Image (cartoon, rainbow, N blue to C red):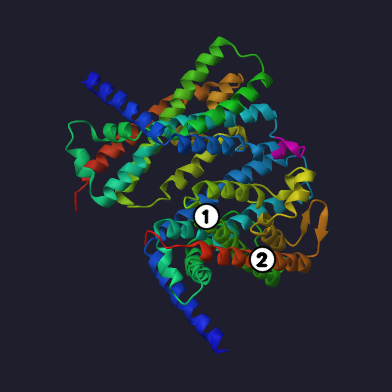
Amino acid sequence: MLKKYIRIYIECIKISISTALTYRLNFLLDNFIMLVSNILFPLFTLLIYGSGAEFPNWTLYEVLLIQAVFTMSTGIANILFNGVLWATMRHIIEGSLEIVLIKPVDCLFFLTASTIEFSSIGLFLGGLVIFVVALPHIGPVSILMVLQFIVLFLSGVCVMMGISFIMAATSFKWVGNSRIPEIFESIKYFGRYPQNIFHKVISGFTSFIIPVAMVGYFPAASLLGKADATAFIAILPCFLFAMAGVFLFRHMIRLYEGVGG
Amino acid sequence: MNFLVKKFRVVKAVALVTYKEWSAYRTHSMVSIFVGPVYFIVQYFIWSVVYSGKTSLNGMELSQMLTYFGVTTLIGYLTMDFADWNLQMLVRTGKFLTFALRPIHHRFFALSQKIGHRVLGFLFEFLPCLFIFVFIFKINMRPANFGWAIISVALAFLMNLYLNYTIGMTAFWLVQAAGVRRVYLLLQSIFSGGLIPLVFFPGALQKFLLFLPFQYVSYVPAMVYIGRYTLAGVSMPIPQVVGLQAIAVAVTAIISEYIYRLSMKRFTGVGA
């Protein structure tokens, strides 16, 4: 069973790569523009620090590190899960979800696997560039910190997965609304900044309810030696959030009534 | 006079149809009622922290900064535009032919569409967010001078249309104008003042921005609203800035018309 799923997934990755290679110039240009626009992303923070102001107790490079991690996480999530929403939305509008449902694999798995798209690799690389720039300016990093970073980073990717699945599930009811991502985009915005600047109620929300703090802030904090118990307690809500996404999607499929398929 | 009455009838008809067409998707517009305030909350906390212990940054106080972000959000709802996307789609698919045959200038048609679309934005985005900013966040959203603010926003409305329309016209040469649009939108989002007030940019860049059209879309109307305009060390009284904005709009309109005439010579209508 598991073997079958892994085989399908690998096959989908191969197809996605060959698609990207067919239009390689377009692929490269797209990625280049994305890379450049994402290197510009921390501009806001740079300009604040440039004007002589700062986030108290945070150096410029520490804040850049948070934003670099956030961008890398977004890049990975976009490659792996971004297509689910659009594919689901298209199927709902056209009434063609039945074609996916009759396949002998899990619907959500199939939609996720078949929409892997490497066009967001520029996003990841853009984040990586900022990460590499910021890294030499922070304190020494121990192996323990790196391990913590990896665990927290992966939890953050789980949150992104949960968000993608919840958005896809929403599109069952809110048909054809291309602005669904904006709603979550705005919530994710909280994850890009040091959490101690927010009110306690908000940082509680971003750590435990919709744990977007895990997307950028917590993993970066672990590399800076600023990760406290909250960061590790917040791992659990991340996995619960991802599970919630899966369950919600499955629930919506049960409610789905094919029309016009 | 007859000419104006006819023009007005066209605007009314097209705007009304566009309004009806898009009001079927009014919940899509209403996403802004959530998104706008959420971004604002983030800005609120960022600037509250950044200003701690400081009374002013680059000549702006905290309360002005918050008003600035509230105002740019609201002005965005009134001036939002996708004429560029629409035009390049019409050109690429060949549907532009049907517009080229009509006895109306397509840009005028696009303007009428935009009016209808933004009336919807006014009702479902602008008003709800204004109430949230004023009554929940307690931000001072009273313009320094109503008259100048309205004129400036109206000019920004036109400026955004003319700029976007001109970018859309690149499709007559490039067919697939997605790349150009992306670069333009990126530049516009940074240099129009939507990201951060332009006075936060390095001095040399500010001087450069003084001569670019971007500031007239967002920064100028926002500063007119607040009642104080400064860029690159140049301060101007409000009537003068609005005058300058009007000149910029007129120049952009003329350039846009010139490119439109060149485009019409190029357009072949293949694919229709």
> Residue B179 placed where, x, y %?
52, 46
Residue A144: image quadrant is top right
Q: Residue at x 47, y 66 (%)?
A: B117
Q: Residue B173 bears which disc, if any?
A: 1
> Residue A125 placed where, x, y %?
53, 28
> Residue B206 placed where, x, y %?
76, 48
Per the model, the C-alpha gap separating discs 2 and 1 is: 24 Å
Residue B110 to residue A13: above or below: below
Q: Residue at x 54, y 35 (%)?
A: A32
> Residue A250 placed where, x, y %?
26, 37
Q: Residue A56 bears which disc, if any?
A: none
Residue in the foreground of this view, choosing between B156 and B58: B156
Chain hosting mark 2: B
Q: Residue B249 bears which disc, if any?
A: 2
Image side of residue B173 versus residue A164, left or right: right
Image side of residue A179 versus residue B202, left or right: left
Residue in the foreground of this view, choosing between A15 and A108: A15
Residue A156 to residue B87: above or below: above
The answer to whether the residues at label 2 and label 1 have Cβ atoms under 8 Å apart is no
The local crowd at label 2, few if under 14, some if 14 to 19, many if 20 or more residues have their Cα within 10 Å, is many
The local crowd at label 1, few if under 14, some if 14 to 19, many if 20 or more residues have their Cα within 10 Å, is few
Q: Secondary structure at mark 2?
A: helix
Q: Residue at x 51, y 24 (%)?
A: A231
- In the rendered image, residue A49 lying in the magenta stretch gets the answer yes
Residue B80 to residue B112: above or below: above
Residue A194: image quadrant is top right
Name the amino acid, label 1. Trp
Residue A143 to residue A227: above or below: above
The magenta region covers A47-54
Which is in the foreground here, disc 2 or disc 1? 1
